[in-house]
Image (spheres, rainbow, N blue to C red):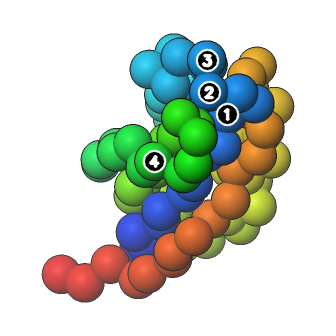
Amino acid sequence: MFAALKIKIMPTSPTIDLEKIKEKAKIEIEKIGARVHASEIEPIAFGLNALILTLAWPESKDPELIENALAKIEGVNSAEVVDFRRAVG
């Protein structure tokens, strides 16, 4: 069973390439057994943007696993689950 998980990835600076972070994040996410369904850029302030990823996440796994894995990517300041919903259907 999968859940819909939304995670916010904050870069270390406005000059970080969010596309590179997204590609590295996809690799880490797939290692854990999840899939990326959507991504978007969210403006924060002063030219800083966050990367928002929506995932199909195995309900049996702790979301903290993905936060820790993504936070270790070079150029990532933090990764935080901002929404977790049980998938319907």
Residue type (three-letter) at the residue carrying disc 2: Pro
Q: Residue 25 falls in which quadrant of the image?
A: top right
Q: Cα distance, mark 3 to mark 2? A: 4 Å
Crowding at dot 4, Cα within 10 Å, few <14 / some 14-19 / many 20+, comes out as few
For disc 2, the marked residue is 14
**Amino acid at dot 3:** Thr
**Which label sits in the foreground, 4 or 1?**
4
Q: CA distance from mark 3 to mark 1?
A: 9 Å
The location of residue 39, given as percent across then percent down, is 34, 43
Considering depth in this image, is 65 or 75 the residue closer to the camera? Answer: 75
- Report whether residue 32 is seen: no
Q: Residue sitting at 50 percent across and 25 percent down?
A: 18
> Please, what is the three-letter code of the amino acid marked with disc 4?
Pro
Label 1 crowding class (10 Å Cα cut-off): few <14, some 14-19, many 20+?
Answer: many
* Label 2 packing within 10 angstroms: few (<14), some (14-19), many (20+): some
In three-dimensional space, the C-alpha distance between marks 3 and 4, rounded to whole angstroms, equals: 13 Å
Q: Are marks 3 and 1 in contact (CB under 8 Å)?
A: no
Q: Residue at x 25, y 84 (%)?
A: 88
Compared with residue 82, is residue 44 higher up or lower down, i.e. above or below? Answer: above
Would you place residue 50 above or below residue 26 in this image?
below
Decide which of tag 3 and tag 4 comes sooner along the chain: 3
Question: Which labelled disc corresponds to residue 15?
Answer: 3
Q: Which residue is mark 1?
A: 11
Q: Are marks 3 and 4 in contact (CB under 8 Å)?
A: no
Which residue is situated farthest in the front direction here? 46
* Residue at horizontal 43 percent and vertical 50 percent from the top: 42
Return the disc, 2 or 4, that comes first in the chain's sequence.
2
Position of residue 64 measured from the top left corner of the image (x, y, whole percent)? 76, 61
Q: Mark 3 near mark 2, Cβ–Cβ under 8 Å?
A: yes
Residue 82 in picture, x, y percent from top left: 57, 70
Residue 73 x, y percent position in the rendering: 74, 26
- Taking the image as shown, residue 45 lies to the left or right of residue 38, namely right
